[in-house]
Amino acid sequence: MTLDYVANDGLCAGDDAVAGDCDCGGSCAEFGAGCANGCADGCANGCADGCADGCDCSEAPEAGPETAPDDCGSASAALLTPVALKAAPSNTGGGKPGKAPRPKRPDFVSTTNACKLCTPLGAMLAFRGVEGAVPFLHGSQGCATYMRRYVISHYREPMDIASSSLGEKQAVYGGGPNLKKGILNVMKKYDPALVGVATTCLTETIGDDVGGYLREFRNEFGDLDLPEIVHVHTPSYSGTHMEGWNAAVRALVDQLAIDKVEPHGKVALLPGFVSPADLRHLRDLVTDFGSDVVILPDLSDPLDGPALEDYTPLPEGGTPLADIRALSGAAAVIECGRSLAMTPTGPSGSSGSAGPATAGRVLHERFGLPLHAVGLPIGLRETDALVAALEAVTGKPLPRRHELERGRFVDALVDGHKYVSGKRAVVYGEADLVIGLVSLLTEIGVHTVLAATGTRGAHLAESIAAVTEGMLPAMPAVIEGADFEEIADTAEGLSPDLLVGNSKGYRYARQWNIPLVRAGFPIHDRFGGHRLLHVGYAGAQALMDRIVNAVIEKTQSDSPVGYCYL
Amino acid sequence: MTTATAPNVTATAACRDADLLDERKKQVHRAGQGPIDMACNRESLAGAVSQRACVFCGSRVVLYPIADALHLVHGPIGCAAYTWDIRGALSSGPELHRLSFSTDLQEKDVIFGGEKKLAAALDELIDLHKPKAAFVYSTCIVGLIGDDLGAVCRKMSEKKGIPVIPVQSEGFKGNKREGYLAACKAMFRLVGTAPTDDVSPLSVNILGDFNLAGEIWIVRGYLARMGIQVVANITGDGRVDDIRRCHGAALNLVQCSGSTMDLARMMKEKYGTPHLRVSYLGIEDMADSLYAVAEHFESVDPGIVERTRDLVREELAALMPRLRDIRRDLSGKRAAIYVGGSFKAFSLIKAFRHIGMNVVLVGSQTGTQEEYRELETVCDPGTVIIDDANPLELSHYVRELDVDVFVGGVKERPIAHKLGVGFCDHNHERKIALAGFEGMYNFAREVHASVMSPVWRFVPRRSQRAAVPTGADA
């Protein structure tokens, strides 16, 4: 019974083996003989390429338990008892065995416990990352208030979002007057450098021509000292908060980086939706290469500021407008996000605007800036890719400080691998975050069995395949457009050992009695969620520490012995 | 370096109201300075960052705690996502309310209509969860694309044999108050649809308590000791079947000035059920409320007044010594109150007096003219009264009035904290019971824990004015 670490990568493992089913997760290359003997072609489901005999690798693993022949499991269980023993206790988490099966989700049209937020929220966050900006929602009052509360609970910082506060009359006659009056009021109270206007489902549905209203506004009030006004279409019935974020970043570049300026050699970094701690780390990384950097957007100071003596209407920090206007002079642009990079060209559903689909591509196509599209730099290899881009742009090698950080992380990989090797993880959240997390998990030996995002059209499977290639016994199940109930339904057949993602998965971690390693947004049930570091070698280290410790803590608290030496 | 003394509040009082937007001036008043004439209950001003929400929010707040109902939000995902399990409204049984259901309308639904999707969603969710009733919340765009919610709900109700009730809560059609009304109308459709045989003549419904952190259980405990049956919790720890027979109760106890008063009025009109306005926050209000209930039932049960007196005496005998140390520490400190409904403000002002603190700022999102006029009479002269405030105004007054602790919701917290001011969460997210006599103690402890923390020594604004704890039990 002391065999508490086994590479249970598939074979006929887990509770399914006990129950007489087969859950051949893979690793058949290693244990090929056992697998072939034990389960023959029953060993079909979720098996990676390595499993030569009769495996249909195209089948998603979650289909496993129901379809596998009965005799398969018992045979393999007999053959590989330790595996079955190891996995058996994880059954007690509740929720898995003996529960009435839920109806198959694909037939469901409703959403239960969404794994996404609405489109304008992402735009509001992105606009918050510009210096002197006031995020402005063109819609009814509730949207702004709900989003503020949601954002505040994560960052524990003020987050003002102005609203055009449309009422019934404006919904009928159009929201133009409210939009204009709202901007004037914002100018009066905030004196902003930028007003970032995003639409909502209300104003998109009534067909408000925000671009037209803003042109009128500029004409009518041209005598005033007007702020920059950037607008973006973010109907909440199309896309998720990530599409909103990306559309807003793209709009900032598209509408502000108009002129070709003298080259200034700075690195333009479009980091994606990462934490203030991440943004500070990325700034240090580029700066250590001896290069100045423009990070867009930069939430680090606006959403993680110091205690103040006097309340400032606008928080300090954020990407300076001048820097955005002068992006054409950058040495190169680095855009993070594998999923983002696969955004199709042309009018996309959420941004509704023609032309290049991402901010990076706008800069590339408009000014010929070299574009380095990399993943969110989470984990060793994705950080290596960012570093390679920086080396190419700056012509300098990785600074010693970061080289040492990398070295220490590799050292930690070795030191920590046994604690987590073969553990099974369910990862959920924004597509690019999920890809980064899966990449890291794969490096430390954790097997992702399910990767899910609320976004549709994220090309998640392709990216997950790319970051796990040759390293996992089986391709994880991948779900796009997922809600948490679908994630739960799928995960229940996969015997996960841990969840990795935002706070909203806590209900399920609790139900299954497995750890939730918190990452991303929102972290509403822990202190310091916005200070979590995910990116770079240091971020990989921080994440690995937390993952390993979550597993150790679980082992410790489950143990009847109460070891204080593990 | 900041000065070592607190600014003179009255001296600075007059100077900075000029910062207010012109339209907002009629929504701020200083107690004792001229007649009060608040221009409240108007639409929030475009461009001002209001702390208010929308019609949907009002409905969702009221109906949410009904634990055995399916709450389906018909609209794009945001409205459901932002209201998923964020409140501390507890249930003693089913917890269906803690799941977030949405039709998650997509572009094609907006173009071709969402009725089919809604019907299918109801169909599958009712089959799966077997709720006692379903509430279907309308959101902004449902009001625009013209889905016939009523028809879909009627059909589903017939098909499934449970009440399926539309809630007309299109976000843009007013503010939170209209949402309360829509919720009350929805609940009223349930009232009177179940037998009331076993209802005692000494019986009440509890309206406008949402059982945050188990508060309704505290109140029910007191009522039980008085010998009173509670027919329906409306809506904290609420059940559909209880609401269906709540017209059998002899009296409605209505807390929270806005949210459920409409239901009480409807019940008065149709069933003749009288109602009492009550508050469970603070010592006087809790005691007064129980006495008022006792008085109401005195003719039916003469012993009830005595029982109530004993109850209050026992509770106070236990509570007062525990408050003493806390009051010693907090005496003379200043509080600001900004809450959703103004009823809470009344109780809080009195509660702060019990712990020796002065309320220097009080405001609400949805107070009425009448309520503000009443509010002024319980305020000290110079207290700033504000309707539908925004962060800039709140932070302005927090500084001007040199506030020690701010009572509000999650949106106000970062303002207070950023300026180095203590905070007590009095909104729906809180996990600490503040109702009843034991709630008063919890409240005092909350305030004490924040005000007396050593952290204020280190914030820029207060670095010279450190509090010295005296060892109170906190």
Image (spheres, coloured by chain):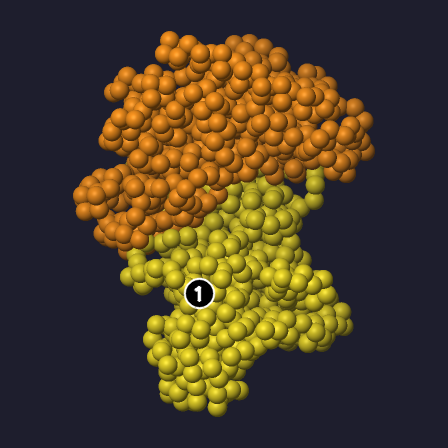
**Horizontal side, residue A510 vs residue A528: left or right:** left
Which of the pair A469/A417 is nearer the observer?
A417
Q: What is the drawing colour of chain B? A: orange
Please provide percent x and percent y for residue A454: 42, 59
Q: Position of residue A249 (x, y in %)?
A: 51, 57
Q: Which residue is painted at 53% across and 18% down in the image?
A: B311
Q: Position of residue A124 (x, y in %)?
A: 50, 48
Q: Secondary structure at mark 1?
A: helix
User: Which image quarter holds the N terminus of chain A?
Assistant: bottom right
Quickly name the residue at label 1: A491
- At x 76% / y 36%, what residue is drawn? B454
Residue A145, visible in the rendered structure: no
Pointer 1 chain: A
Q: Please state which of residues A45 and A171 is positioned toward the viewer in this rendering.
A: A45
On screen, residue B338 versus residue A52, left or right, reads right
Residue found at x 32% / y 50%:
B129
Question: In the image, what residue occupies the spot 52% across and 34% down?
Answer: B427
Q: Position of residue B395 (x, y in %)?
A: 62, 31
**Chain A image colour:** yellow
